[in-house]
Amino acid sequence: MSANAPIYAELCTHWLRIYRLNHLLSVAGVDRNTLMPPAGNEARANAMAELEGIIHGLSTEPELEARLASAEQEPLDDIAHANLREMQRHWRDANALTSALVERKSLAGARCESAWRLQRPANDWIGFLGNFREVVAVAREEAHMLAEKTGLTPYDALMDRFEPGMRCEVVDRLFGDLKTWLPALIRTVVARQAQRPVVVPQGPFSNSSQRALGQELMSLLGFDFNAGRLDESTHPFCGGVPEDVRITTRYHGDKPLQCVMGVIHETGHARYEQNLPRQWLGQPIASARSMGLHESQSLSFEMQLARSPAFGESLSALLQRHYGAQPAFAPENLGPLLRQVRSDLIRVDADELTYPLHVTLRYEIERLLIEGHIEAEDIPRLWDERMRDWLGKDTRGDYRNGCLQDIHWSEGLFGYFPCYTLGAMYAAQWFAAIRRQHPDFDVLIAQGNLAVLFDWLRQHIWSQGSRWETAELCVRASGEELNPAHFRAYLEARYAS
Amino acid sequence: MSANAPIYAELCTHWLRIYRLNHLLSVAGVDRNTLMPPAGNEARANAMAELEGIIHGLSTEPELEARLASAEQEPLDDIAHANLREMQRHWRDANALTSALVERKSLAGARCESAWRLQRPANDWIGFLGNFREVVAVAREEAHMLAEKTGLTPYDALMDRFEPGMRCEVVDRLFGDLKTWLPALIRTVVARQAQRPVVVPQGPFSNSSQRALGQELMSLLGFDFNAGRLDESTHPFCGGVPEDVRITTRYHGDKPLQCVMGVIHETGHARYEQNLPRQWLGQPIASARSMGLHESQSLSFEMQLARSPAFGESLSALLQRHYGAQPAFAPENLGPLLRQVRSDLIRVDADELTYPLHVTLRYEIERLLIEGHIEAEDIPRLWDERMRDWLGKDTRGDYRNGCLQDIHWSEGLFGYFPCYTLGAMYAAQWFAAIRRQHPDFDVLIAQGNLAVLFDWLRQHIWSQGSRWETAELCVRASGEELNPAHFRAYLEARYAS
């Protein structure tokens, strides 16, 4: 390839350098969130900003535009074309913003987020607004700059960085459909579950038993410990690099299932990273395709597999072996316990039935905000209305459990929320496809045979990296573009039957 | 300052960038040696090499030479002059080598070191020689390039990077003196200790009790846990950055004192880093002065303080509280146990009486090698002679416990060994100075009052960073240049009385 396409080969070398430097940012980020003591924070932030500046410089080198265009004219195979497409996308996004705006955004976000950490517990919405108005102003400018460069609408341009190719038009259709049937389904399920109480685990459960169970689950789910680790952090995450994936969990003595389900969730993310295509590693084409697809992997593991009736016996046996036998862990109680639905205030604690409404609410509000139809001070009103109408909750005046609960907006992270529910929809679609191809899928799972699942995900998702645009990847994997009917059918089958 | 000295101010900004980027190499290095799983190694090495290349590029920017010269002409205060002196030294060392040689060195060292990991246990000296000859050839070329740039002799030029200002002429005098009296002292002490056997600890000792004891010792010794941590690794080290110092230890169930003394040793290094001058942090002047001075801090803590009779009661009480009471930990046994001397084959396990001979042996051999007076294949003969004459040991044919035991040479690290014993000499000189100023020093230590020690080290060593050249720092701290009489007097008082 490189003999006939010298410019493309040069570009590959350039992106490999960026990949290697990003490795160090990942390591420093993982360390910051797991081990770093408080006094290390300022020096760490300065060091990371310095390297981010260098990476931004490499991503916006003036010669790149001409070189990207020239490489297009070289004789490239399909893989190289796809890789070049991803390079162009990265180049476009990196170049869309002025460095003045990037700096203003970083300052505004850091100030607002750091104050938010105290304002949230203090329920101080007015104080938050003082910093948040600047965050919104910057985000609108950012959206407009990105829109100008991409030809997309401002909100689409923000969302495109996380979910390339996804547009509001599609999200509106997908989420709009949800709103027509999901609130009623939730009411039905909540009412019915109230008739059949479940037994909750009786703790305490030691950290070491939770860790041992977590590691055994990770092995069972195919995590490669030769190329990754399980550590601890306040907020669980999956980080690191494809060659060395770090997932974290937290241990609460009286919430043993939180750790279990969190580990399973992060293991889904981890297996995607650990199985990205090795032959292209270091190139943009080898990256995970989108945040929605990433979430589809964690939710495939956590929701589709681990909370399924088919997996119940295996999970029950594991829990009883590590935690001891107790009524909560018996299969006939564990299933209902893992599938409990509750209209609640907090997104991160929500079950999979109410979660999409939390996401839809945020999507609608942040889009109105970015597009200038509302201002920051209008948020609580819109929040309260939706929580009342969709989840039957009164959130008036309760900012801490309302619109102050997420970190995203405080940092200026707009356009990300839809990915969570897109991921849930993709996951349902993957499982529908697997069951069509393997009618005995649930029997196999119940027998403890997970290979059929892993093989399918490896073949259709993990090994594909960013080879295809998302819509095409979806068609190739499942025979059709993202179709919310699968998600609805799945939720109804699991919860309403 | 910056208004009157704009070029100097620019240089400070430049070196601050380098400092920040080096932060990320430190973090990545600590992670590699504590947490990183094996499969992460290649990607980590590539990422670190990429950033090292960028740092080398920043350190050798062509404009720097002229800017460093112009800054000399600006009106600078003493601090700025000292900082500029350190910048010039760094610039000189970074520019001395061609990038072709740096690459060749890196490859030769990596190949030889990685093969050594298997050749050492296999006692395969001939196999080692196959790779090592190239390492020696590169090191000689490196030494000659550095010598040309610095005007030093080749070995001095290598040593100067670790112990700036130190010269073979001085080392020959210091180590030559040692050789005249130390072997005889060792024989006397070993013979006398054989008459009074000591009781060794009866294990096992749990990792958690060793960790708790280690952390309590660190607190007692003033380690700031808000700006650092204790972790685990195969080979204990002190790493990280002054704002976030990471020390490590390892836990052997039946060697509880190894962990204790190792933690104390690394805490000495850590307090130097944690107390480097904050007002200059990020500039070369704020760095630890030399590797010998660094070692003088770890040995001040481990040898001068922790193995002293005055500290015995405190240490005994701590050990008994964490490990339970047993005869080995009683003060009257613990002291002799911690001061046991044994002629042995392995440097890293050596006591402080035999250690300097292990170092002198290596210094003499590597210097002959670098200067071309011997070839790699002559090493075992010289090794065997010295081990026989100085420590009464027969090492013929036992390469694994002889000249293959250290990692240094396999990596091409020449000129470093002297620092270990220079550090031991500096430490003895510091304690002699403290005792002159505080005649009640040992009484205070025995009462558990360590402030007098920490205050002296902070004032004379830690807070000085690289403010003075080493010889001047030594005079300012102790009233004279490095004087081996203090080390001899200390060893004789501790072991021969």
Image (tube, coloured by chain):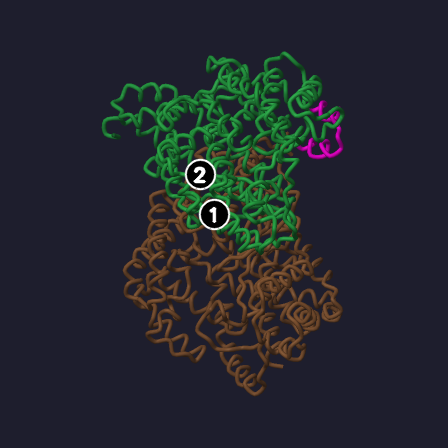
Chain colours: A brown, B green
The amino acid type of the residue labelled 1 equals Met
Dot 1: few (<14), some (14–19), or many (≥20) neighbours within 10 Å?
many
Q: Residue furthest bottom?
A: A195
Q: Is residue A306 above or below residue B257?
A: below
Q: How far across and down, in percent of the image, does residue A356 sit?
A: 50, 70
What is the number of the mark on residue A60? 2
- Residue B225 lies left or right of residue A140; in this view the side is right
- Residue A73 lies left or right of residue B203; in this view the side is left
Q: Which residue is mark 1?
A: B218
Q: Is residue A389 above or below residue A140?
A: below
Which region shows up in magenta?
B114-131
Q: Is residue A343 above or below residue A285?
A: below
Q: Nearer the viewer, mark 2 or mark 1?
A: 1
Q: How far across and down, in percent of the image, does residue A314 sit?
A: 70, 69
Residue B129 colored in magenta in the image:
yes
Q: Magenta part mainly helix, strand or loop? A: helix
Provide the chain ID for the residue under circle 1.
B
Q: Distance between the Cα atoms at labels 2 and 1?
A: 47 Å
Return the residue nearer the eye: B332 or B258.
B332
Toward which corner of the image does residue B104 lie, by quadrant? top right
Q: How far across and down, in percent of the image, does residue A92 sit?
A: 46, 44
The amino acid type of the residue labelled 2 equals Thr
- Residue B311 lies left or right of residue B132; in this view the side is left
- Where is the N terminus of chain B found, in terms of image quarters? top left
Q: Is residue A481 visible?
A: no
Provide the chain ID for the residue under circle 2.
A
SS type, badge 2: loop
